[in-house]
Image (tube, helix red, strand yellow):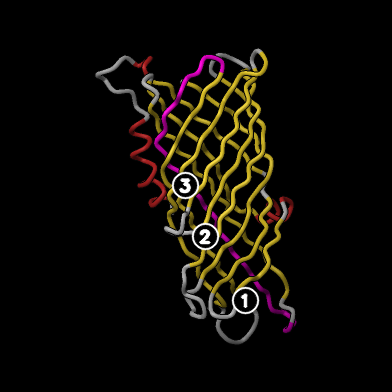
Amino acid sequence: MIIRFGSLLLPALLLMQPSSAKPADNWDFVLAPYFLAPTIQGEAGAGRFLNGAGVDVDTRDILEALDLGGMIHAEVRHSSGFGVIVDYAFMDLSSESSGPLLPGTTIKGDVFQGTLEAYGSYRFDLSDHKLDLYAGIRWWDIDVEVSRRGAPGPGELFDGGDDWVDPVIGTRWVAEWWPGWRISLAGDLGGFGAASDFSANAQVLAIYDAWENVSFALGYRVLSVDYDNDEGGTPGFFAYDTVTHGPMAGVLLRF
């Protein structure tokens, strides 16, 4: 997973390096680590027998099951208005519970959810506010593993998941509403039947410019997807129709 992510992110990071043929001040760079306190709701299906199972996991459950997670947002923009936006977020979760039928057995579930977004963008600078148009891809990677210990028979009950790439188009509006304060509204649509049937993202942020090159952001994000791999009734079937949403906070570092 680290190698795969690195191979996708490296070209975008290379684009973030100023060209030696142009002055460095022609480029603006933003690096923003952030945290999302997510709730996941919807339905999921996996394998031959599990279809339409309800998913309702709140922030507390996710934090208790969280083994590893990370969220980073990066942007580079030229003075011409053209730019690149990259965002990666992942959660690696695991939990254990006693087997409901056989005493002494333990059921363990491991879930990985990752999304990588990579967009080309163009900014319209309209004096007191800015409008960004962007288009690109959102790559999803979902892995699910269920195993048991302390019972006869195979230990692995299910090991599957899927990854797919959705085309995405979107817009973002940024305006100063008080000296030192900005508001950012962003939304996009994706999927269009190319991979998922539908995907959408909406985000609102209040941004405080604390220092010349450092800002703090607080807001809320909603990310939805409706996907299945058209292999219903087979061991390889996977479906994921969920909404991930929650408050978010981050630090914006400008270069």
Measure how far apart labels 2 and 1 are at the Cα level. Answer: 21 Å
In magenta, the rendered stretch is: 101-128
Q: Is residue 127 magenta?
A: yes
Looking at the picture, does residue 193 appear above or below residue 71? below
> Upstream in the sequence, badge 2 or badge 1?
2
Q: Quadrant of the N terminus?
A: bottom left
Q: In the image, what residue type sits under mark 3?
A: Leu
Using residue 207 as the reference point, say whether residue 230 is left or right of it: left
In the rendered image, which residue does mark 3 sit on?
116
Q: Secondary structure at mark 2?
A: strand
Identify the residue at image location x=48%, y=27%: 30
Identify the residue at image location x=34%, y=32%: 15
Identify the residue at image location x=52%, y=23%: 130
Query: Is the residue under label 1 in contact with that under label 2 (CB below 8 Å)?
Result: no
- Looking at the image, how many numbered discs can be counted on the residues? 3
Q: Dot 2: few (<14), some (14–19), or many (≥20) neighbours within 10 Å?
A: some
Q: Magenta part mainly helix, strand or loop?
A: strand
Q: Dot 3: few (<14), some (14–19), or many (≥20) neighbours within 10 Å?
A: many
Q: In the image, what residue type sits under mark 1?
A: Arg
Q: Is residue 176 magenta?
A: no
Residue 205's spot in the image, x, y percent? 63, 31
Q: In the image, what residue type sits under mark 2?
A: Ile
Looking at the picture, does residue 89 appear above or below residue 45? above
Measure how far apart labels 3 and 1 are at the Cα level. Answer: 31 Å
> Upstream in the sequence, badge 3 or badge 1?
3
Identify the residue at image location x=54%, y=80%: 48
In the rendered image, which residue does mark 1 sit on?
148
Closest to the camera, between mark 2 and mark 1, is: 2
The disc label shown at residue 142, or none: 2
- Work out which residue is located at the far bottom of the displayed protein and give it: 152
Residue 76's spot in the image, x, y percent? 42, 28
Q: Secondary structure at mark 3?
A: strand
